[in-house]
Amino acid sequence: MVGIVGYGVYIPRYRIKTEEIARVWGEDGEKLARGLGVFEKSVPGPDEDVATISVEAARNAVKYARIDPRDIGAIYVGSESHPYAVKPTGTIVAEAIECSTDITCADYEFACKAGTAAIQTCMGLVESGMIKLGLAIGADTAQGRPGDALEYSAAAGGAAYIIGKENVVATIEATASFTTDTPDFWRREGEDFPSHGARFTGEPAYFRHVGAATRLLLDKTDTTIADYDYFVFHMPNGKFPVSMGRQLKIPKEKLEDSLVVRQIGNTYSGSSMIGLARVLDRAEPGQKIFMTSYGSGAGSDAFVFRVEDAILERRGEVPTVDDYIARKTYIDYSTYAKYRRKIKALA
Amino acid sequence: MADQGGVAQVWRRIRSIYNIQGNHCTTCDTYYFPPRLVCPKCRRKGKLEDYRFKGLGTVYTFAIVRQAPQDFKRQVPYVVAQVQLDEGPRLTAQIVNCEPSSVHIGMRVRACFRKITEYGHGGIIVYGYKFEPTMRVTGHD
């Protein structure tokens, strides 16, 4: 059965505290951080973008999977901050991890769920026998308009998953998606920052889609919450996934391990995939993981994973999510503004 | 613009700068980076084969740049070093992911993938190697 052969993550080293952003905009930082459930967020260095983050994550995934990168037949990179509007990020990744040229590649965009859409595409290609291994990446260097609520959570990071049939560390038992036309968050061509429908991003958008996709897959697999050891939801902030868990009556401890958003913010396409990686870093063989991503616009992809024995012997090869979370250097708002090109006068 | 920022020159070097790809002369057992067309030691007796460097090395010497060209102002202060690769060749590269004040001669480093430069707002982006200290997240505890 198709599954995850290897995975790797990358989180940039810089962090800015919610309190520091709040200080600049005259808000109560402590209250905001607690309300949002985001205490600090990752910030990419001036020489980091989705291509570099994807390459570092993919290199970790290849090392973890112990595969020959020339066996990869497809690369899909999901992001809403691809460095080029036209020229696929995947081509850069393919060259940098030394894949063969006998490969299909494209960039995906579906707000924060483009990476999980890439996993589904790779699953289909592997299942049909068209390719041996597929590489699905979700990475972003998310931008929030200065002073906007999004600025407190828009972060940077990525995760890469190698999908195949042999030597899987986690089997993907089932997947289901829920998609509608819901304009909760968007960015028009040529705009620097996204726009959003404020409160509208909650009930009719995030909660409706994540809830529906989750219930859909539970029905499809004829299982209940009690059948799973871990849940991973997309994390636009620290509040939404917890509240989703409460609505679905998921015990708190089953969600806790995935909540990386508190320390690194919302890494958009990387968000649920980094959450899943953190769970895979600690899950035991036989345990079951339920993940539901969310992309504005809007849609959700839900997955059921069963952890396999092989996971134990692969650990320790590459840095874990916690290793990356622990490696950090705080910066102030002015350095953040400089790195994130918020100072327009500086070319 | 047709050929903004030397597209062909960048393209020719992609393979060597993404993965520190050089070559190795099997006659005299010397490693070269950037790759050579002939072995300067053995000349026509030399036999060169492609070699991908492991990307591990040591800081041979370095400078902290505080007066940078326009395109690099955002990164000031930053470190430019001569890195001696474990296989022998020395190359010039930036050291990232650490405080400039913590860089020292003899520091162990490994190659990472970064944006080197970009040809203006609408031009191509050049990616390639920089170096970072070996540490837990690089898998070299």
Image (tube, grey):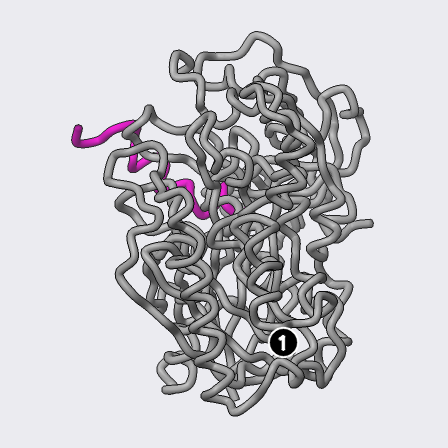
Q: Is residue B49 left or right of residue A118?
A: right
Q: In the image, which residues are magenta?
A: B1-19
SS state under label 1: strand
Amino acid residing under circle 1 = Ile
The local crowd at label 1, few if under 14, some if 14 to 19, many if 20 or more residues have their Cα within 10 Å, is many
Indicate the position of residue A286 as horizontal and vertical percent values.
71, 85
The residue lying toward the viewer, choosing from A29 and A137, is A29
**Residue A150 visible from this viewpoint:** yes
The residue lying toward the viewer, choosing from A129 and A158, is A158
**Residue B45 visible from this viewpoint:** no
Residue at the image point whose x is 66% and y is 47% from the top: A262
| Quarter containing the N terminus of chain B | top left
- The answer to which image quadrant residue A265 occupies is top right
Indicate the position of residue A136 as horizontal and vertical percent values.
46, 65
Indicate the position of residue A62 as horizontal and vertical percent values.
58, 64
Q: Which residue matches tag 1?
A: A289
**Main SS of the magenta segment?**
helix
Q: Is residue A99 a member of the stretch shown in magenta?
A: no
Residue at the image point whose x is 51% and y is 22% from the top: A337
The residue lying toward the viewer, choosing from B110 and A137, is A137
The residue lying toward the viewer, choosing from B110 and A133, is A133
Q: Chain of mark 1?
A: A
